Image (spheres, rainbow, N blue to C red):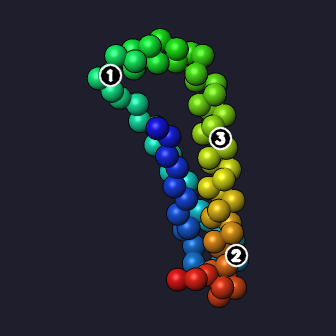
Amino acid sequence: MVETHATPLTGAGHERPRTAVVEATIAASDRPGFALARAAAPVLRPLMRRTAGRLWRDDLAYAERRWALRSTGRFPG
C-alpha cells in the first residue's frame, strides 16, 4: 500500500503557500502469495514508483486547489 497525504503549512492569504507531502509505503502479509510478490518485487518496483509519483502529483494538485479555495474564502468548511 502506498499512501500520501498533503498538509498545508501556511494559512490563507500567505504570499508563498507551502505544503508538506508525507508518503508511507507498507507491505506485509503472512499469505502464501506474498512470497511470490516479494520475488516479483524487482519487476514491480518501477510500476510502484510510477504510481507513487502520480499520487504525489495528484496530492500536490489537490493541495493547490484547496489553497486556492481557502485563499479566496470559497473553501466549504
Mark 1 belongs to which amino acid? Arg
* Element assignment for label 1: loop
At x 35% / y 29%, what residue is drawn? 28
**Residue 64, horizontal then vertical, whole percent:** 68, 66
Q: In this view, does 76 lie above or below 27?
A: below
**Left or right placement of residue 4 versus residue 36 in this view:** right
Mark 2 belongs to which amino acid? Ala
Residue 13, visible in the rendered structure: no
At x 55% / y 59%, what residue is drawn? 6
Q: Residues within 10 Å of mark 1 (few under 14, many from 20)?
A: few
Q: In this view, does 11 lie above or below 56?
A: below
CA–CA distance between discs 1 and 3?
28 Å
Residue of label 2: 68
**Residue 21, horizontal then vertical, whole percent:** 55, 54
Q: Which of marks 1 and 2 is nearer the N terminus?
A: 1
Camera-nearest residue between 13 and 74: 74
At x 59% / y 62%, what residue is drawn? 19
Camera-nearest residue between 68 and 16: 68
